[in-house]
Amino acid sequence: MIAETVCSAVSAAGLGIAAITAYRRRFLAAARIAAYALVPVGLVMTGIVDWLADTAFSPMAWAGFGVLGASWLLFATTRAVERRRAGTRKERKAARSAARREAVAPAAPASSPGKGSRPAAGPAPASRSEDDFGDIEAILKKHGI
């Protein structure tokens, strides 16, 4: 009974604000405010407000909310653990099947240098840090620094 009165008062106040907004020639905003203002009356007319009031004072409903919360907590925990591992169930299954295929497939024969093969030409590759500095020097030279 009190909830219906509060919802009616909220709707009346919202419609008043919508009328003032329309008086100021802001019709689009006024229509939007009126739409929001009619929601509480619609909830009262459909009976949702009575259902919510009955639910708020029901111990069985609160126990149900507790069970839903525990369910959500289990879902979130298992998802977090799954992310810390190797991914989803499909990804783990694909990785296992790929590992089995590699174990079953014969190893490729080692290729020995033959008549047609040539050794790699040029000096041995520089260390990684020298390559990095070479790249930096090239960028600086490109910009005239």
Image: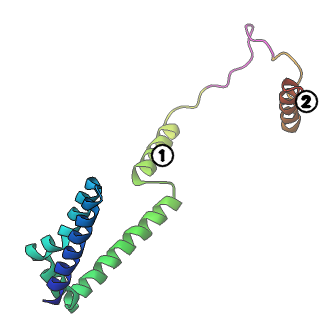
User: Which quadrant is home to the C terminus?
Assistant: top right
Q: Say few, some or many: other residues with alpha carbon within 10 Å of mark 2 (under 14 / 14 to 19 / 20 or more).
A: few
The magenta segment = 109-119
The kind of residue on which mark 2 rests is Ile
Taking the spot 12% from the left edge, 77% from the top edge, the residue there is 44
Task: Kindly indicate the quadrant of the structure image that contains residue 34.
Answer: bottom left
Marking on residue 145: 2
- Residues marked 1 and 2 touching at CB (< 8 Å): no
Q: Which residue is at the far top?
A: 116
Q: Say few, some or many: other residues with alpha carbon within 10 Å of mark 1 (under 14 / 14 to 19 / 20 or more).
A: few
Does the magenta-highlighted stretch encompass residue 116?
Answer: yes
Between residue 30 and residue 68, name the one nearer to us.
30
Percent across and percent down for residue 130 are: 89, 34
* Distance Cα–Cα, label 1 vs label 2: 50 Å
- Dominant secondary structure of the magenta stretch? loop
Say which label, 1 or 2, has the lower sequence index.
Answer: 1
Marking on residue 95: 1
Taking the spot 20% from the left edge, 84% from the top edge, the residue there is 6
